[in-house]
């Protein structure tokens, strides 16, 4: 029997907001820390530190998709009401992660000298420091991977307050920690020790929090070989997606560098870095909806459908006006920030990437449903088919049309991927309750509006479009798309905020 508290709409909305804060806090810490670290370390050492941060980010790929697998399998058992199976799943997965982490840490210890000495072009005085920094970081791999698994278990129970109570300080510490070291040492080795220690502390925190918040984990458990096979099968497909996704998102920059110039990369990468931050909104929703889909799909398809449509609606409502304003004021905004010459090159890129980001954001919902339903192989196979097609198109359009061609190829890929994801998700749900023609009308209307705004010229015409469209848009959202319960909830929320503001 489905525990409805795990798929409660208000809980999901609250957890999505907490997730978004979890993504945003490290960005704020980075904004504060990077100038200080650049001044203290110098360009060369800071460049190595940036590689350390990248290494920290990508070490998570070594979890073999088991964090995601644990979330899906635990949420599925919760949806079925089979809590007695959960301890075996959790501790089997945790044992695998700790073991894999230990083996990989040992392998990395011997491989890192080759990477540092033969692959990276470093000055001789930086080699020893870089070597030991990388070794220290990879020694924390067992703790990092175990943390990812335990976090996945907490997410299955919708304990996002707990996961972010660990993740937010850890994300902030990744950037603030090196700053705190500076009064005592400006060596990368010392900074790496502090960062690795943070990983150990976060792992201990998860080990303490999980049994406290999840009584199921206090029950007797054993490692089951059959569960190992299921976890690794699910995680293997997730790993394929995790490897291909960064390529699909960032490889166009390497194509631009190879076929055009490094300057062209700057003109492309700057607007790309800005607009793709909007994906954090849909990622926050996806992280919460994924375990909710896994729990509800096992026993209550109607609830899954409601969550699916709600996710589409809320992401669309949130991001469409932002995408519209970015398309409308791309050149003015970039000129104000980077200068008119830079804006003249980058604004067309930003205009083309904006609808692509909106479409990919909406694509996060069917992607979460497909994986939550226990079919990570579908998304992985789609990405395997998609990658060579995209690479061919990207090369052709980059050579033919420059950075604007690369942006068009990126957005077209997003349209293709999202369309296929929706077709597959609707087939998995096997529902006749969706008003697909109406959904298509909304999407086509939105696309037409974005295209129309992209060709508008003149500040007065743009201002008129803004003051006309924005009020009309929110009026349609309020009266047409939001249900009476949703309007009541939003009204009560604003009422509480106004009362709390008045008391101050």
Image (cartoon, rainbow, N blue to C red):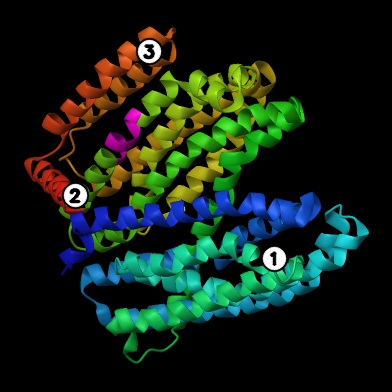
The disc placed on residue 182 is: 1
Above or below for 287 versus 432: below
Mark 3 vs 2: CB contact within 8 A: no
Q: Which residue has dot 2 on it?
A: 497
Q: Which residue has dot 3 on it?
A: 462
Side of 294 where 148 appears, left or right: right
CA distance separating discs 3 and 2 = 33 Å
Side of 260 where 346 appears, left or right: left
Residue at x 25%, y 39% (from the top left corner): 313
Mark closer to the chain start, 1 or 3 = 1
Residue 253 on image: x %, y %: 66, 35
Residue 104 can be seen in this image = no
Crowd rating for badge 3 (residues with CA inside 10 Å; few <14, some 14–19, many 20+):
some
Side of 178 where 125 appears, left or right: right
Magenta span covers which residues?
A: 315-321
The secondary structure type at the circle numbered 1 is: loop
Mark closer to the chain start, 3 or 2 = 3
Residue at x 11%, y 48% (from the top left corner): 492
Residue at x 45%, y 37% (from the top left corner): 417
Quarter in which the N terminus is drawn: bottom left
Residue at x 38%, y 24% (from the top left corner): 325
- In the picture as drawn, the residue positioned furthest to the front comes out as 504
Q: Is 494 or 501 nearer to us in this picture?
A: 501
Above or below for 422 versus 338: below
Mark closer to the chain start, 1 or 2 = 1
Task: Give the image quarter of residue 33.
Answer: bottom right
The disc placed on residue 495 is: none
The secondary structure type at the circle numbered 2 is: helix
């Amino acid at each position: 029997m489905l525990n409805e508290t795990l798929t409660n709409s208000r809980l999901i909305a609250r957890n999505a907001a907490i997730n978004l804060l979890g993504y945003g806090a490290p960005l704020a810490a980075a904004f504060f820390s990077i100038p200080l670290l650049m001044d203290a370390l110098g360009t060369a050492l800071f460049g190595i530190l940036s590689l350390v941060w990248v290494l920290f980010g990508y070490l998570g790929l070594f979890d073999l998709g088991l964090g995601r697998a644990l979330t899906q399998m635990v949420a599925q058992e919760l949806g079925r009401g089979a809590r007695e199976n959960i301890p075996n799943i959790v501790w089997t997965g945790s044992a695998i992660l700790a073991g894999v982490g230990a083996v990989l840490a040992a392998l990395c210890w011997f491989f890192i000298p080759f990477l540092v000495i033969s692959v990276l072009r470093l000055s001789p005085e930086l080699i020893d420091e870089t070597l030991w920094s990388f070794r220290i970081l990879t020694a924390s791999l067992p703790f990092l991977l175990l943390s990812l698994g335990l976090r996945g278990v907490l997410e299955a129970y919708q304990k996002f307050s707990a996961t972010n109570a660990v993740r937010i300080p850890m994300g902030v510490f990744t950037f603030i920690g090196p700053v705190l070291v500076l009064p005592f040492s400006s060596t990368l080795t010392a900074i790496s020790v502090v960062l690795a220690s943070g990983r150990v502390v976060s792992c201990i925190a998860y080990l303490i929090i999980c049994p406290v918040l999840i009584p199921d984990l206090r029950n007797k458990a054993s490692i089951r070989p059959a569960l190992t096979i299921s976890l690794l099968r699910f995680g293997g497909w997730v790993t394929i997606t995790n490897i291909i996704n960064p390529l699909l998102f960032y490889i166009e920059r390497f194509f631009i560098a190879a076929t055009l110039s490094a300057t062209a990369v700057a003109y492309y990468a700057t607007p790309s870095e800005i607009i793709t931050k909007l994906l954090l909104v849909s990622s926050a929703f996806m992280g919460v909806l994924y375990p909710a889909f896994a729990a509800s799909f096992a026993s209550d398809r109607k609830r899954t459908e409601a969550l699916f449509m709600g996710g589409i609606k809320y992401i669309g409502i949130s991001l469409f006006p932002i995408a519209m304003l970015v398309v409308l004021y791309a050149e003015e905004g970039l000129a104000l920030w980077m200068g008119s010459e830079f804006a003249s090159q980058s604004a067309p890129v930003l205009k083309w990437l904006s609808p692509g980001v909106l479409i990919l954001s909406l694509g996060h919902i069917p992607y979460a449903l497909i994986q939550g339903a226990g079919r990570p192989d579908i998304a992985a196979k789609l990405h395997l088919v998609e990658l060579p097609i995209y690479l061919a198109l990207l090369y052709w359009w980059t050579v033919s049309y420059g950075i604007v061609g690369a942006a068009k190829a990126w957005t077209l890929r997003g349209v293709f991927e999202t369309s296929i994801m929706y077709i597959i998700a609707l087939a998995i749900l096997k529902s006749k309750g969706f008003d697909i023609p109406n959904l298509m009308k909304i999407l086509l209307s939105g696309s037409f509006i974005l295209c129309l705004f992209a060709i508008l010229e003149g500040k007065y015409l743009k201002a008129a479009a803004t003051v006309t469209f924005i009020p009309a848009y929110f009026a349609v959202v309020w009266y047409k798309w939001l249900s009476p319960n949703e309007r009541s909830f939003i009204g009560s929320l604003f009422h509480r905020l106004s009362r709390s503001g008045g008391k101050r």
